[in-house]
Amino acid sequence: MQALRLGPLVFGALSATLAACSASEPDPPTLEQRGLPHDVISLDRVPLGEVRAALADAGFAELAVEHGVNLTKVVYDTIDAQGAPILASLLLAAPSDCAPVAVVNYQHGTAFGRDEVPSRADVADADDRSVPALVFAGHCYLLIASDYVGLGVSPGRHPFMHAATEASAVVDAWRAARRVAEQQGIAWPKDAFLVGFSQGGHATLAAAATWPSDSRLRALAGISGPYNLSDIQLEFTLEGQSPVDSAYLGYVLSAYAHLYPAPAASAYLKPPYDRALAELFDGSQHIQDIIPNLPATPRELLAPEFADQLERHEANWFSTALAENDVDRVTPSVPVRLYYSQTDEIVAPEQSVRTSARMRAGGVAAEAIDIGPIDHLSSWRPALGNVRNWFDELLAKPSATSE
């Protein structure tokens, strides 16, 4: 694999979370102990005709697929934010009648409910958790999609927008899927690609920074991803352009309050949200259940002094935590494409442009690609086929590290 270069400020979370474990606690699992599969559950065998029909219903009729798809759920070992062992789940999608040409790790968008994950997705849903499995596995790729820590079968709260656990869950899912493929006699490709939508774009850059040396990473793509949380995305969210902004901000606040030293909730949230927020984001509710219990704008959610601090870019516990989870300084040595829409109302499109520019300044073959006027939740649709075609083109070329 080609080396990855990291900027000086990136990924405090990746090292700090493990270092925070006290000497009296058990040692964190070794890499050999992570990514071990436990339960392997066959979910569905989708014939080619049904793959094509499902993709046509999802608006992908023009995207060629040539193979049926076998869907498997795998429960595997990874680590939580403190470096302790925890179970997670993933979806493995394999073509039914060809040796896979490459591995694609797909990182899904934000899930508020723990059941809104790839391993629970139905191919008839036509959403960003089920369609990628058919798009890639139906075209002879092997697709892996982690549910992330705290979602799917994983216990506890989801550490939303926490770079370290996103990275470990994704990389350990790759390890677990490789072991399952070996057990099932599926040929394991050397080449790998990363792609993610929304939160998955953030997770994609996080995973790229710690990608395994025994896998040849060829490229990565982000779709409408929030890469700079502490500056661009925070300011964009506080503007309250979308009716879901309060939910996204509340999700991050709730997650970080459980991950970092935080004051009492009354110091940063208005009543009654200082008492109610934690229960709203425990994984038991979906976005449609959460929105009626939150104010129309993020400003109404926050304690006035705390909101003023954020708008003035003054340092506090939350802004410091956001900065630790910025991934816009990850500098891969593989090609990168960051897709965005100028009319995105939830994730600031500017960060795709700035992050790709920063990467180019570091010598990366990075592009920011405008997919046209489309809302955030639909933006993965026009980008996904473009990403697959790009991966096909790269596979047709010899890798710089080909053996």
Image (cartoon, rainbow, N blue to C red):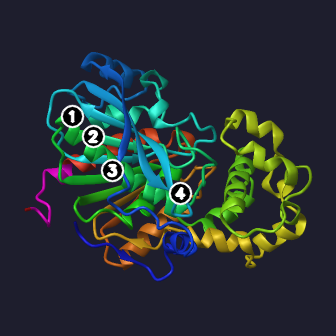
Q: Nearer the viewer, mark 3 or mark 2?
A: 2
Q: Are marks 3 and 2 in contact (CB under 8 Å)?
A: no
Q: Amino acid at mark 3?
A: Trp
Q: Residue at x 29, y 53 (%)?
A: 193
The CA distance from mark 4 to mark 3 is 17 Å
Residue 47 at x, y percent in the picture: 27, 18
Which quadrant would the C terminus be assigned to in this image? bottom left
Instruction: Return the residue at label 4.
Output: 80
| Residue type highlighted by circle 1 | Gln
Q: Position of residue 295 (x, y in %)?
A: 84, 46
| Residue at screen point 41% across, 53% down | 170
Q: Is residue 334 left or right of residue 35?
A: left
Instruction: Give the residue furthest to the bottom.
Output: 8
Residue that numbered label 3 is attached to: 174
User: Do callouts 4 and 3 mark residues in contact (Cβ within 8 Å)?
Assistant: no
Q: Secondary structure at mark 3?
A: helix
At 36% from the left and 79% from the top, the residue drawn is 362
Magenta segment, principal secondary structure? Answer: loop
Q: Which residue is mark 2?
A: 180
Indicate the position of residue 245 as horizontal and vertical percent values: 71, 50
**The quadrant where residue 96 appears:** top left
Is disc 2 in contact with disc 1, using a CB cutoff of under 8 Å? yes
Q: Earlier in the sequence, mark 4 or mark 1?
A: 4
| Any part of residue 231 in sight | no
Horizontal side of 180 relative to 200 (left or right) equals left
Q: Quadrant of residue 268?
A: bottom right
